[in-house]
Amino acid sequence: MSRLPSEDLSEATAHAAVYLRRLRREQLRLALLSLVAFGGLIGALPLILYLLPGLHDAQLLGVPLPIWLVVVPPFPLFFFIGLLEQRRADGLDEAFRDLVEEP
């Protein structure tokens, strides 16, 4: 008779360790991808400001444009990357739950 994954998890068998290790690995991969995306996009701002020195003279509403570029984009970017990460994490959790729940 075959065993259900939920029985493996409740009894902490070797199969349970495999299921949990895979879930953790996928969650870590997702977190690192989000970190690299956010860090790469925000880290590129100083490079953009360095490579485009003409931006230092531009102003928007009396505030220099480089200030706007450093202050404004990180917040919506952080929100949207977090939203995408949350949706993907929920999908991973749901797939794991479907795997271990009894039919």
Image (cartoon, helix red, strand yellow):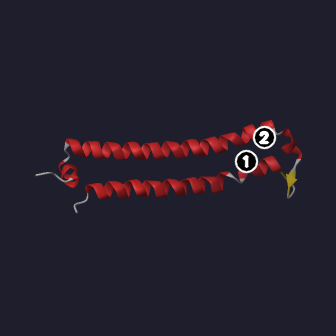
Residue type pointed to by label 2: Leu
Q: How crowded is mark 2: few (under 14 residues within 10 Å), some or many (20 or more)?
A: some
Q: Give the label, 1 or 2, closer to the camera.
A: 2
Instruction: Please rate how many residues cluster around mark 1, counting C-alpha atoms within 10 Å: few if below 14, some from 14 to 19, many from 20.
Output: few
CB under 8 Å between callouts 1 and 2? yes
Identity of the residue furthest to the bottom in this view: 103
Q: Would residue 54 be found to the left or right of residue 100 on screen?
A: right
Quadrant of the image containing the C terminus: bottom left
Marker disc for residue 70: 1
Q: What element carries label 2?
A: helix
> What residue would you read off at disc 2?
49
Residue 54 x, y percent position in the rendering: 87, 42
Picture disc at residue 56 = none
Instruction: Give the mark nearer the N terminus: 1 vs 2.
Output: 2
Q: How many marks?
A: 2
- In space, the residues marked 1 and 2 are separated at their CA atoms by 9 Å
Location of residue 45 in the rendering, given as x and y in whole percent from the top left corner: 72, 42
The residue lying furthest to the front in this view is 1
Amino acid at circle 1: Val
Indicate the position of residue 44 as horizontal and vertical percent values.
69, 40
Query: Which x, y percent locates residue 11?
Result: 17, 49
Q: What element carries label 1?
A: helix
For this rendering, which residue is in front, 103 or 15?
A: 103
Report the side of 11 relative to 49 (left or right). Answer: left
